[in-house]
Amino acid sequence: MINFQYSRAADVADAILLLTAHPGAKLIAGGTNLIDLMKENVEQPSWLIDISRLPLRKIEETADGGLRIGALVPNSDFAYHPLIEQRYPLVASAILAGASAQLRNMASVGGNLMQRTRCAYFYDTATPCNKRTHGSGCSAIDGLNRNHAILGTSAACIATNPSDMSVALAALGAFVHIAGPSGERTIALTDFHRLPGDTPHIDTNLDTGEIITAIELPPRGFAHNYSYLKVRDRLSYAFALVSVAAALELEGNAISEARVALGGVAHKPWRSFEAEAALRGQAATVEHFSHAADFLLQGARASAHNGFKVELARRAIVRTLMQAASATPQSQAHKKIA
Amino acid sequence: MNAYVGTATSRVDGRAKVTGAAKYAGEFTVDGLVHGFVVEATIPRGRIARLDTSEALKVTGVLDVLTHAHRPPLADKVEAWKDEVAPDEGSPFRPLYDDIIKFNGQPIALVVATEWETAKFAATLVRVEYQEDHTFATELETGRNRATEVKRPHEPRGDAAGALAGAAMRHEADYFVPTEHHNPMELFATTAVWDGNGRLTVYDKTQGVLNVHRYLCGVLDKQPDEIRVLSPYVGGAFGSGLRPQYQVVLATLGALALKRSVRVVLTRQQMYGLGYRPATIEHVGLGAKPDGALEAVMHEATAVTSRYEDFARNDSGWAEQLYKSRNSHYSHKVVRLDVSTPCDMRAPGAASGVCALECAMDELAVALKLDPIELRLKCYSDRDQSEDLPYTSKQLRECYARGAEAFGWSKRNPAARSMRDDKELVGWGMATGVWEALQMPVAVRIVLTANGHAEVFCAASDIGTGTYTIVAQVAADALGLPIENISVKLADSTLPQAPVEGGSWMAASSAHAVLGAAEDIRQELARLASAMPSSPLAGIDAAEVILVDGTIASNGEKSRAVPITDAMRYGKLERIEKHKLNHFAEDKSHARNTHSAVFAEVKVDEQLGVIRVTRVVSAVAAGRILNTKTGRSQIMGGVVWGIGMALHEETVMDHRFGRIMNANIAEYHIPVNADIHDIDVIFVDERDDHINRLGVKGLGEIGIVGVPAAIANAVYHATGKRIRRFPITLDKLLT
């Protein structure tokens, strides 16, 4: 680990000031990803601004009936909050599909959005990686890419975003509240993460000096027909090969509203508005779900070792939508697939 | 008397381990201890053109940076570097010896600082320029055509190739087992304590303190009394600690250079630069008559080794112990690559080779439309065919029977894809396991004190397998004392000799050394007791005397007894001390093996290919089980590892860089709790009066052998897909 300066932010404004004043600075909350990356010398922040004591730990109802979750709420508190369990079980399920109990206790909601790819080349400072060192080249494109992206890739990067929580938040249309030098703003979660393009070293659309203050869930929670399915190489404690967050509203057997997002396949949670539009008004059948999968996987491009992800994603989408439609969501405690 | 042997005695060191009182190599602390951090090569082949340590040395707290150009002397002769487990062929790796890079991850410098964190930081400031040799190669499969035959596990019998070609039913295939790493929980570590005047006390993570002791004396040119090596507790090693690892050289070099105590702890990532189970292509050919009788067995293994040592184990050849065939041919080839030398890993050779053999037997059974057990019974061999010898014992038939019964094998529908449970395909598979029952020279010293306590001393390591416990059990029974009165001291190079702990030989070997020393104590106590005034044992033949319940007693009439403490008081003896080397009669009249039958149930999600191993039954015949509790744990651990070998474990290398890309246990997958369901261990009664006095065979390896094949065969039965490339990940079932 490289030496660094450390200061504790007094409040959000102070954090923004410090972040603006020190270009090499990073915010630290739970540190579950940042510290690992620092130990590997992948991240070398000159300054750590500790925000873990800022008052961003509340989960509150919003005026329109949604929920606002402070950026520092631990992942586990988020998942086990009664209002989340009742109204947004998809989010709870996605969080519990990730990491371990110990990590979820430490990791913050804001930090979860900021976690970086697990691409092995990104982690190995002896190999080129455009995300770690802009312009150094991508080792994965012609290298080991079994775990890599099939959607939204670029010639510079095929890394995936590893978050489970973000996939559920994307499906539910969550928003990210941001504070920065020029005030506060709110952006859709689906616009928070970026595709790699030719700037894969930039993961998110946060501007300099900006900090996540909260996540907001809209009123619609899809608490009845939902499922989060994470397919991976072992039955716990592994990143997704493919994950699917699915949420439906049904009138009889007809779909009145549908949400589907994918994890493990792209540089950001992958959502297709065409796929969801195609499902509206249709019966909840394998045929229609397969059609939605076609939309979601449109333009999928496999590398040498991850071609299976296209078919796996197709099957997982159908399966997860079936689980959602039949109100038999995937349990994260029983590793058997429902 | 067997108050303890054969029972479920809890570990005598259990409390020390769970309370943290048990100290491991990296936990010994002395005043002035400083810390070393290793700098590794990032290329697989070439030379160090320039190694600049100036920036690192400027860091406050950094004491020195050792390199090949700046270090205390190291032995130049290759022989000095050959430890007792080193391959015969080749020249062992010599850390910091010269500027040549032999593998990616090779240690090239040791930064020593007052704090570990400082050393780790300064290590990032060591600048290295390489003269790279781009002709490196690290991939087994592309190197297969230049493989070199290095050994034949057995001489060929008959004409295997001809018999295979002419067989009514033939099965021939390649099976691929990837490189795997041991990943013991405890990190490799050495604390080298500077005792002054060039003397060192070395706490090392090792499976053999005497091996490390001899090695260090040779490598550092020290007299035996200048170095003492201890390894009181080992947090798993599984073969990775059989050979001295480079951190012990670096820590002791550091101590000699700085004349102070140095600790070196490798990171998890750095441990991928140590040994590993070599990737192997197992080519198996089986020829059979229509009724299943084997006509030919051919097995050729092609495995990874380094460019500097030929590491080779018996992957092939196990069919000689298992299946009758008039014709057989076994060979082992290596492909020399720019990687570190492989090393033994639980059931070396057999874990991979028997996996392939038992998958091949399953494929043959399918082709012949025979039940897999029926085929194995049809070919069952009561003799070791290569030597044409009977076994000291072989209850493998009983393993099949007991295992099948416990598993419910008779309810199996033989057709693939014929069984399902809702959305999951259900598969039942089985395989045979086999390992050697070896025994080695081991000496112990027992000191019996007049208060009725005994201490047992031996240089053997307990690598977590339970050696402390079984030594205490055997000693307690042999001396007729409660186990609380026995203390065991192990893994110190000043103690009586023992080989490295490995190969499943330590239980039988150490137990019989204890028996021997205890026997000498019994003789002496018998003499004392019979000579006491008005002794109830007056005139008794020493052979009629036993030690039981703290007394010296007549075997026929236990009321004729003298307390041990009384006899010693009478003899004015504070202590009786006996040193004994075990003795096993030289006997080549029998083959010695352990056996198992493994049954596995898998459930495979038909749509997604997700595999769950829902049940495993392992029926083991391994002679007398000294401790049914630690023994059962051994087998369960082997089964869990076998599940990992079947479904998860694979060291992935990018051959463009010659670098391992999943050198951590987040990305190198081993099974987690969610992957483990029911595991049923059955110890089949196997009385063996021939092998040794206690009838003990050893359990370290047998638990894993056969497990991956049973699972692979179950996956075939569930899905109709034969995956010959391990691990069986879900993508292989999707296509």
Image (cartoon, rainbow, N blue to C red):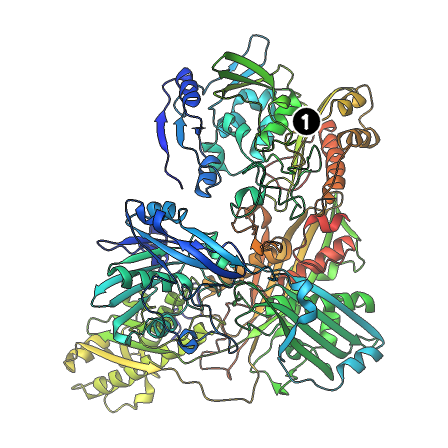
Q: Is residue A316 above or below residue B730?
A: above
Residue at figure coordinates x 82%, y 30% from the top left: A291
Q: Which x, y percent locates residue A135?
A: 59, 37
Q: Is residue A273 left or right of residue A148?
A: right
Q: Quadrant of the N terminus of chain B?
A: bottom left
The quarter holding residue B455 reads bottom left
Q: Nearer the viewer, residue A87 or A237?
A: A237
Q: Is residue B431 visible?
A: no
Q: Nearer the viewer, residue B412 or B210?
A: B210
Q: Is residue B512 above or below residue B463?
A: below
Q: How many numbered marks have been drawn onto this rendered protein structure?
A: 1
Q: Which x, y percent locates residue B696?
A: 48, 76
Q: Is residue B213 left or right of residue B161?
A: left
Q: Which x, y percent locates residue B205?
A: 38, 62
Q: Nearer the viewer, residue A171 or A10?
A: A10
Q: Is residue B174 left or right of residue B193?
A: right
Q: Is residue B27 left or right of residue B304?
A: left
The quarter holding residue B441 reads bottom left
Name the chain under label 1. Answer: A
Q: Which x, y percent locates residue B484?
A: 30, 64
Q: Is residue B715 above or below residue B610?
A: below
Sort mark 1 into few (<14), some (14-19) or many (20+) by Cα contacts within 10 Å. Answer: many
Q: Nearer the viewer, residue B182 or B130?
A: B130
Which three-letter amino acid code belongs to the residue tagged 1? Answer: Tyr
Q: Which residue is mark 1?
A: A226
SS for dot 1: strand
Q: Is residue B493 visible?
A: yes
